[in-house]
Amino acid sequence: MQEFHEHRRATAWARKFLETDAGSPGDAAVTAGATAFRISAGDHLRIRALEAGRLYRHVQGIDHETRPMTPQELAELGDPMAALLFRRNVFPMTVQDLLAALPQPASPSQQAVYLISEAGQIPPGTAPGLHRDIRFAIARSVQGRDVDLLISTGANADPATTFLQVAAWDPIAKVFNYYMRITPAWVWAGNSWSALAPGSRGNGCFDSHVNGSVVMKELKQPWPNWQSQAATIQLAPDDPLRKDPLYQQVSGAQDLELTVRSLVSRWTAARLAAVTVDGTVEHPDHLMRHLFTTTSVNLTSSATQSATITAAGDDLPLPPGLWLNTDALLDDLALPTTASLPLAPASLYVDSLTTFGFRLEEKACGFSRPGDTFFAFVTPEAAYEDNDVVRQLVQQAVVPAKFAACALMVDFTNPVFSTDRARLMAYVPTVPTTVAALTTQIVQAILAAAAKLPATSPEARFAAAWDLPDSSWAASFAQRIDTYLGHVGARIRTPSGFDDYVRLAESRRREFKAMRLNEFELTLPVTDIPSDAPRLTMLEDATLAP
C-alpha cells in the first residue's frame, strides 16, 4: 500500500494523522477503499479512492466524505486554480508543475518566494534527528498586479509527496478558495464563508484560517522563524535545497507581511460589504466577536536575538503587544498617549532564563536545548485579522470609534484572551439587526446590566467609559494608558516585577498552545512553570492576579 504523507507535520499536536476505517492507527492508502484522513487535530476527512484528473470537495464539518465536484460547482469557482487549471483538466501534482502550468509572470514582481522553519536558526548538524521542516510560501499574481494565489508546500522534502496547499482569491465571489492536493487529485476544502459557517468553523483548514483569510502568524518585525532582513535560515553548505530554483528566489518576510496585510484587508472589505449590503447585519455576533474576543492571535517578539543579550547589555524592549493592543488603540484609534514603552534591564532577562528553565524542545525527536527562542520573548498579541475587522467597521461607520475604544479599554491591559471583555458578547444581538441600531442596542443592554452590577464589573467599566464626554474620552483613555505604562516601566526594572511578566507571557503562551494555530513545538520556548499554573491577568497598576 502507498504511504500517505501529504500533510503538514505538526509536532505540537498530540495526534495521529491517519486511521483506518477500523480505527487502528496506520499509514493509509488512497489507492483503494476508504480511509479516514485527519488533517487537523480532532477532525476526520473521509477519503474515498480518488481518481486522477478530478477536483473533489470536502468541507470538514459539512461534508461526510469526499465527492467529485459537479460541473456546475466547478463552473462557479472563479479563482485562477479553477479557471486556468481545473476547468481545463490540468491537475499539477508538484509545486513546480503548478507554477509552470500558470501563465508565466510578465515581471519578477508577480511571483515572490518566502521561507520559514521553526528550526531554521538551529545550526544544521548540531541536533541529530531534528526535522527542520522548511517550508515555502509563494505569492503569485496571475490576473493582474494583486496577489491571487498563496501557495504553501514543503521545501526540503519530495515535491511529489510533501503537502501542497493553495489559498486562491476568487474576484467574482470575492472569497478565498482553499485547495489541497491529495494525489492523484485535488480537493476543494471550502471558501472564506466556510470559516464562518457553524458546521465548518474551526474544522479542517479553518482551524487556522479561522476567519476565512490567509494567515501569517509571525506578521511583524522581526518575523520570527521566517527568512527576512532580520535573520537568515541556516542551511548546511551541501544542502540540496541551495540548488532549488525556488530557494534561489527567496525574498524577505518583510515583503510577505505587506502582502498578507493586503489580502486580509481585501477579504475583510468584501465580507463587510456583503453582510451590510441591505443595511442589516444578519449575524451581528460574528462581527462583534472580533472586538470583544480573541478569535486568533499573531506572535510577536523582541527584535533582539536572545543569544546576543548579556547581563551588562543595553535595556531590552519587550514586544509592545504584551502590554496592550497598540495597533488598535494607538494606531487605528489614535489615542494621544505620550508614555514611552517599558524597557527591561538585560540582566533580569538573562537571570530569568535560568530561574524559569527556558529551553527549546521537540519531544517528537527528543531535541532539547537550554535558552530562549532565536528572537527573545515570543508572545501572542492581538491578531491583525481581528483588528482589521474593527478598523473597517469604524471606517465604514458600522460602529463609532468611541464604541470600539470603550470596548477595547475594558481590560485593555490584557489585549488577548480577556474573559472580562469576552463577557460583553452576552449583550450583542444574535438576530438580524440594522446597522443604524446595532451600537445603540449593544450599549443599552450593557448599561442596563451595569446598573445592577458592581463598579468593578466589565459592564460597569464599559458604562463609565461610555459616559465620558465625546470631547474628552480619547484623552481620558490615553491618560489611563500612560499611567499604566508608567507602572509597568517601574515594575519591570525590579526582579519580582520582571519575573511576574515572564509568568504573564507564559500564561498567554499556554493559551496559544491550546489553539490549533500552534503547529510546531519549536515555535515557543518551554519553561519550568507548571502547565496547570493559574492563568494570569494584568491589572492597571501593573500587578498580576489569577
Image: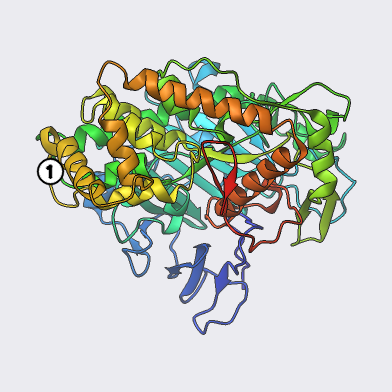
Q: Is residue 91 above or below residue 326?
A: below
Which residue does the numbered mark 1 point to in the structure image?
A: 433
Give the residue at x 31% y 43%: 460
Q: Is residue 457 above or below residue 334?
A: below
Residue 86 is situated, as x and y percent measured from the top left of the image, at 37, 45
Residue 245 appears in view: no
Q: Quadrant of residue 317?
A: top right
**265 left or right of 372 in image:** left
Could you say which is closer to the camera, residue 146 or residue 472? Answer: 472
Residue 438 appears in view: yes
**395 left or right of 341 in image:** left
What quarter of the picture does the N terminus occupy? bottom right
Give the residue at x 77% y 33%: 242
Dot 1 crowding, Cα within 10 Å, few <14, some 14–19, many 20+: some
Q: Amino acid at mark 1?
A: Thr
- Report helix, strand or loop for mark 1: strand
Q: Is residue 470 above or below residue 37?
A: above
Could you say which is closer to the camera, residue 247 or residue 483? Answer: 483
Give the residue at x 71% y 24%: 230
Give the residue at x 89% y 45%: 125
Q: Quadrant of residue 88?
A: top left
**53 left or right of 308 in image:** left
Could you say which is closer to the camera, residue 520 or residue 73? Answer: 520
